[in-house]
Amino acid sequence: MRLKKRLLQAILFLSLNVVFSQTLTGKLKDRNTNEPIVGASVYFDNTSYGTTTNFDGEFSLSLKNEIRSPLVISFVGYESIIFNTIDFDKVYNLSLKPDVNALEEVVLDSKDEWSRPFKLIQFKREFLGRSEFGQACTILNEDVLVLNFDRDTKQLVASSKAPLVINNTALDYKVRYDLNNFSIVYNMDTESTLDLEKTYKTVASVSYSGTTFFEDLPSNKHRKALKNRKEAFTGSALHFMRAVANNRLKEEKFKIFKGAYQIKPESQIRVFKSDSSEITEVEIPIKLNILCKGRQSAIESEVKRFQIDVFGNHAPVDKVLFGGFMGNQRMGDALPLNYGL
């Protein structure tokens, strides 16, 4: 009987591996010349699942876990393709269109009163973050950044002529970030006649969007990096969303507050699950304060319901607002969605 039980367990284990092992295949070419594109990036956004096309423009990407993150296909000088849903039974024969905007010279605003070195400092501080991990990051190709300050709107706007390549030595990640848009809005006196680089200013808001691919960096300090990754994860938005989706707020040491008063999570965080779907729907009707191992955050949803997948990825991203520790985390603190899974 014991032997039969072990055999059954082994069969079930193998069956699960068959179900969740899927391979995505395809071929990439130039839309105008039909020539294969070599070295293009193919990856699932905000994960470490990715590959590049070979000399024939072909790619093959195997996954052991189901994933709902968008698939990104990109190459410098071409317009990217993004698939929100993927059919693993299909072979993707794709063509990339040359990006006309990337080939044109960017004309900077002649009214820009800030020097490039100063704008670069501002960008890195708000994009990479002010944390220990953010300060450990290096952008390897800063020259692809186009930075513009507009005094009338009090905004620093950034774009990029190619994906940013970032080395995060604290977390041992090499991050490729396709920047779609970036802006910092400042609180400052627009009538000031002083040198704006020396004028006191505070940041009113920061917003940016793009797609991200993570790769492990070779390092002889990887054990330290693993501890740093755990520290970055603890109390983060990713940590919170996974805890909500798996009904583990208490086990993960999250405390929920309505104003200054601690409440039971279920009184204001309502979770809806379906047996036929891995997506969790969540309602948070009011602004809540969150405490996790000494880290204070806040969350507010601008939609009646938002969704969380099995990785802890929530959507719509721009409708769930964070403050405190979660709101202050930047690219230097970011982890791939498949971290710890």
Image: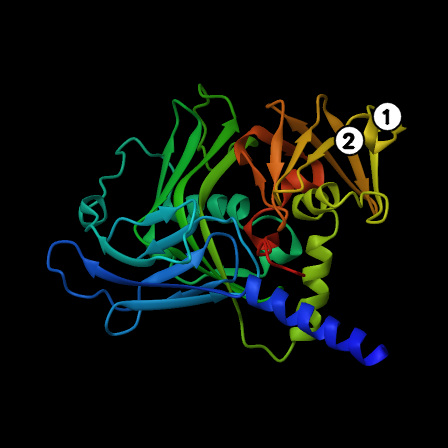
Single out the residue that lies furthest toward the left: 33
The kind of residue on which mark 2 rests is Asn
Which of 130/327 is in front?
Answer: 327
Instruction: State the mark number for residue 260.
Output: 1
Residue at x 67%, y 27% (from the top left corner): 300
Residue 223 in view: yes
Q: Please rate how many residues cluster around mark 2, counting C-alpha atoms within 10 Å: few if below 14, some from 14 to 19, many from 20.
A: many
Residue at x 74%, y 52% (from the top left corner): 234
Quadrant assignment for the N terminus: bottom right
Q: Is residue 78 above or below residue 173?
A: above
Tell me how far mark 2 sits from mark 1, CA to CA: 8 Å
Report x, y in % for residue 269.
Answer: 76, 30
Q: Which residue is mark 2?
A: 289
Report x, y in % for residue 307.
Answer: 60, 36
Report the label total: 2
Please say if the residues under marks 2 and 1 sit with CB atoms less than 8 Å apart: yes
